[in-house]
Amino acid sequence: MEEGLRSTILFNAVMFFCLPAFAQIDSESINQSKYVIKAVRIDGDIELTGKLTDPHWKLAPEVELNYEVQPVDNLPAEQKTSAVVLYNSDYLYIGFICHDTRPSKIRAHVADRDNMFDDDWVMIFLDTYMNHQRAYEFAVNPLGIQGDLMRTGNNEDANFDAVWYSKGAMSDSGYTVEIALPFKSLRFPASIIQDWGIEFLRNFPRESRYQYSWVRLNLNDPCLLCQGGTLEGLEGLQSTGGLELLPYAMGLESGEINDSNDPNSGFSNGPIIGRFGIGGKYSPDPSLSIEGVANPDFSQVESDATQISVNSTFALFYPEKRPFFIEGNDIFNTAIQAYYSRMINNPLGAAKVIEKSGPLTLAYLGAEDRNSAFIIAGEEESVSDNSGDNSFSTSYKSFTNILRAKYDFGTQSFVGALATARDFSNAHNYVGGIDWNLFFGGNYTLDGQLLYSGTKALDDTTVVSDSSHFGNTNFKKGFYGQEFSGTGLQAEIRRDAKIYSFRLTYRDLSPTFQAEDGYIFGNDLRTLEMEHTVQFYPNTPLIDWWGLDLDSFLHFNYESARKERWIVPTLFTQLKSQTQLSVNYLLVNDELYHSVNFFGVHRWNFNLYTRPSSAVTLSLSASIGKFIYRSDNTTLGNGHNISAELIMRPTEKLSVTLDYSRSRLVDTLGNDLLFDGYISRLSAIYQFNDRVFVRLIGQYDQFNKILEIDPLFSYKLNPFTIFYAGSTASLTDYGEPFGIRQTGRQFFVKLQYLWRD
């Protein structure tokens, strides 16, 4: 085994030093200076029809999307696409003309916003500060359905939402799209005359997922925003001051079983509750926004999809869905996730200020939380409360303050600082430090973060009474009122390129490092990971591209005990029919868990994604082989984790999604069944138009014998003006002789309305 490990380390070294020189052969220089659009200003507004029939459109020169940049870069585009840009004092207008030699093959569905990215679509990128750091992405499918994202470097935030307008129209020659972007929905410099970075893209999903671009793109250059063109000469865009108000009203009636452990304990209905609140946002200019909410409604219209946690000892991660936290969330994100918005659980009020002055961004977020949540990091698990949950909420009130500063320079480079503070009446957690991202050499990035934490734990063992210690320290994991400090460090260097990429990551979290406003589920670790990836682009009738990946990992604790190591080779490929396949094998996988050394924990991992037609999408992942049973009686078992999702769109307006996840483990010694179960979920949506849909979600958790049923009616004028009416119901199967009993229920209606001056 040691000989195999040494051979792999030697192979890593050869890859690291030899392949970059080889891969540079593919590099090419692209002159972006020729991709310039002169901004054309118009008087009056354009009424969007999706057909580009307004006479104003003829005033703008057309630009052509001549280059196929996926799956093969910079081939002549097989379909003709053109775009035009206009603006007035209130809107930036973009029009697309998309020809199609086989219009019957166009993929387009009526869907809720952001659920159209599997269709044909067109997209515009706007780098409003022209600094290659951050860009808006606005996409529209042939029926006018919107999708918007925020790009930071090579990362896209799909939670971003803005108010803007679009229409689409299909014809026997293809389709056309019209977009109107209010300047009030964008951030940009306070300059009289300014230039913006701009790029146009068309998605053309057929036997492959083709994409056409206005500019030639070098896939050996990871900075996409650096390769965009320029929208030149925008004048007079200074903000006149913007005020937004978002009041809401909701009614709620809930009921639950009196004792979940006793099916005969009866069911109690709660009173009908009315709740009111308001949010406000003031932007005196595009570089500054001040936002606050009073008695906010941060409830969700559906429960989080249940995740299998039967053999997991760490707190699960759930994405943010609450609008107040979504906007500007990318500014607070760092390499070590010291800020995780869902740790602000049930706030009485919250406020946020974001200012961008040239290269400097300053941000503040504050909230008073009525039911503070906790994730207490440990070496082998997230520490549980006395009920056994490893992420939990309490009745304790806290005040959270987050400060963020970020200074951009060069190309995709920045230095920043982050400070978080959560204060209780007699406890606190403070975290602060610096982070950085340095882009150099055309392909290389050096990034990282250094943090220091100071904690005074709550003194309440009725919530957490764990008396074990953090690593080899004298500090207990439970709420014993102790004070301690810790440090966190992450540093990574990576190369991103078309043929050969690598990353080398070091992470170091001391045993007493805690970030209560963040998602830090484990500590007492020092890890080193190195990954190499090589890709090839044959573009044959069967294969678009394929590649090899080698990932190796070492994990030690602060007592220098080796906790884990793995070596994982992976083969992956992009086939025709929009089919992706990857296979890997844990060639080396050894772990020290609960003082037991496990060697040779080998298993296969498979991933498949295919979208052969507009009506069917299938994804499948499976892990098969050996797993450690993570319990007090830890042992090694044979088993599998399998998850699958099938999306069917039998009509333009109906979508049905089936999700299924199962997990099974059998003891390798005694063949005892350690666990076996599944979670299944069905979601059916009928979308009447771009504003109205009805949805029914049904979910069954076999592990806990719980059935969830969530119907919903939704009217959405824009991302923020919404009417909801729905319910949630929980039923538990108690077995014979009790059968299925209702354990929880909720009915709700909610109306919120966005007012903008």
Image (cartoon, rainbow, N blue to C red):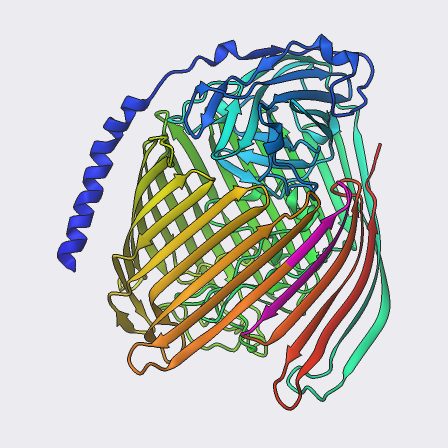
Q: Which residues are magenta?
A: 683-702
Indicate whether 645 appears above or below 174: below
**Residue at left 15%, top 58%?**
2
**Residue at left 64%, top 63%?**
372
Residue 518 can be seen, yes or no: no
Residue 83: x %, y % from top left:
63, 18
**Residue at left 37%, top 48%?**
582
- Whether residue 746 sits left or right of residue 602 in the image: it is right
Residue furthest to the left in view is 3
- Location of the C terminus by quadrant is top right
Residue furthest to the bottom in view is 737
Residue 348: x %, y % from top left:
75, 57
What secondary structure is the stretch in magenta mostly built from? Answer: strand
Indicate whether 5 appears above or below 51: below
- Whether residue 412 sits left or right of residue 445 in the image: it is right
Residue 704 can be seen, yes or no: yes
On the image, which quarter does residue 84 sit in? top right
Residue 621: x %, y % from top left:
44, 56
Q: Indicate yes or no whether the magenta region holds residue 693.
A: yes
In terms of depth relative to the viewer, which is nearer, 4 or 519?
4
- Location of the N terminus by quadrant is bottom left
In terms of depth relative to the viewer, which is nearer, 4 or 379?
4
On the image, which quarter does residue 656 sit in? bottom right
In terms of depth relative to the viewer, which is nearer, 193 or 397?
193
In terms of depth relative to the viewer, which is nearer, 262 or 212?
212
Q: Indicate yes or no whether the magenta region holds residue 531.
A: no
